[in-house]
Image (cartoon, rainbow, N blue to C red):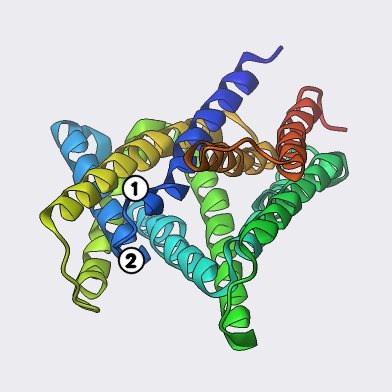
């Protein structure tokens, strides 16, 4: 048993458990828009990250070059700001099921890129686990369609929504690959410190998103609604962004890119589990099949990495 493999898998699982909370956050703050939630989450992420980083700021940033800061900025833009906005628009215009089906192709896209790395497990050995991943995501989308139906608005809205989902897929694929390679390039920066630095960069970018998000349209909320909104935003920022991203960075540093891509399925899995708790119901047969397929996909992919690639 390779301890690095299993600690990396554990870190990826915990990151997915925290990221899955993002999918129930809108249920807790239904009076606020997706851009408002995105802006508040990443402003809080930036603020918390800056507060945690300030005592060690000189040591954390001493070895960083201008190119490294540019990497942090585009990673924050692609993997956080643009991804979240595109995902939210995809859900509104095309429906949650269709959007999850497209974004769920992330493991395939990341594994296809990672299989070209030197010494990586070849794509043919990953194919069975990737097929299981696609099957699991497809079953998740099917279950979503059967419960809520397809979003309305005509074919133009559907097409735009699917395009937004494709943008979200591209953004997180670029983020997963770029973030993993940046961590390998900077062994002197810990996974936790990289998460904090990414938070500072993303928070600065969220300052640009916040004014239009909260000023247009201008809406009024009760003080209790604002308190709940701020509490949820800070909790998600700390749990999903600060801690979750640090765990993801740890997994990215310990595991090959071909396996890291599969770990994104844990986010889908935990989002499903949390939705069952929120709805106070047991999963249906199709949903059970989706969960089994997602878990089997990750385990199969992990097994393919336990022996030297050939």
Q: Name the residue under label 2.
A: 33
Spatial CA distance of label 2 from label 1 is 24 Å
Q: Is residue 238 positioned above or below 134 on the image?
A: above
Q: Which residue lies furthest to the left in this view?
A: 223
Q: In this view, does 231 lie to the left or right of 13?
A: left
Nearest to N terminus: mark 2 or mark 1 = 2
Going 83% across and 31% down the picture, which residue do you hit?
309
Residue 81, percent from left and from top: 38, 62
User: Quick one: SS at disc 1?
Assistant: helix
Residue 24, percent from left and from top: 44, 47
User: Quick one: SS at disc 2?
Assistant: loop
Q: Which residue lies furthest to the top in this view?
A: 1
Going 35% across and 36% down the picture, which residue do you hit?
239
Residue 3, percent from left and from top: 62, 14
Going 17% across and 54% down the picture, which residue do you hit?
226
Q: Is residue 13 left or right of residue 72?
A: right
Q: Do the residues labelled 2 and 1 touch (CB within 8 Å)?
A: no
> How many residues crowd mark 2 within 10 Å: few (<14), some (14–19), many (20+)?
some
Q: In which quarter of the image is residue 109?
A: bottom right
Q: In which quarter of the image is the N terminus?
A: top right
Q: Quadrant of the C terminus?
A: top right
Going 23% across and 67% down the picture, which residue do you hit?
210
Q: Is residue 303 positioned above or below 301 on the image?
A: above
Q: Mark 1 points at which residue?
A: 198
Q: Nearer the viewer, residue 118 or 177?
A: 177
Q: Which of marks 2 and 1 is in front?
A: 2
Q: Number of marks in the image? A: 2
Residue 70, percent from left and from top: 36, 59
Residue 50 can be seen, yes or no? yes
Residue 64 can be seen, yes or no? no
Q: Which of 225 and 292 is in front in this view?
A: 225
């Amino acid at each position: 048993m390779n301890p690095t493999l299993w600690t990396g898998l554990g870190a990826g699982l915990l990151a997915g458990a925290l990221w899955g909370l993002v999918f129930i956050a809108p249920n807790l703050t239904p009076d606020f828009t997706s851009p408002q939630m995105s802006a508040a989450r990443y402003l809080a992420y930036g603020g918390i990250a800056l507060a945690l980083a300030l005592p060690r700021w000189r040591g954390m940033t001493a070895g960083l070059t201008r190119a490294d800061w540019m990497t942090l900025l585009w990673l924050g833009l692609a993997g956080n700001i643009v991804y979240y906005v595109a995902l939210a628009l995809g859900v509104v215009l095309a429906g949650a099921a269709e959007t999850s089906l497209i974004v769920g192709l992330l493991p395939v896209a990341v594994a296809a890129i990672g299989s070209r790395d030197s010494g990586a497990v070849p794509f043919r050995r990953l194919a069975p686990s990737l097929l299981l991943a696609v099957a699991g995501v497809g079953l998740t989308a099917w279950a979503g369609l059967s419960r809520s139906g397809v979003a309305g608005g005509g074919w133009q809205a559907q097409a735009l929504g699917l395009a937004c989902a494709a943008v979200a897929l591209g953004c997180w694929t670029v983020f997963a690959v770029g973030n993993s390679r940046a961590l390998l390039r900077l062994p002197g920066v810990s996974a936790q410190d990289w998460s904090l630095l990414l938070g500072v960069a993303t928070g600065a970018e969220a300052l640009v998103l916040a004014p239009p998000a909260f000023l247009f349209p201008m809406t009024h909320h009760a003080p209790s609604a604002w308190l709940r909104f701020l509490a949820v935003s800070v909790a998600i920022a700390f749990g999903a962004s600060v801690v979750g991203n640090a765990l993801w960075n740890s997994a990215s540093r310990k595991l090959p890119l071909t396996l890291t891509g599969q770990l994104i399925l844990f986010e889908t899995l935990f989002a499903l589990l949390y939705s069952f708790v929120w709805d106070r119901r047991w999963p249906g047969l199709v949903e059970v099949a989706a969960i089994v397929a997602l878990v089997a996909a990750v385990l199969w992919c992990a097994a393919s990495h336990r022996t030297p690639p050939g």
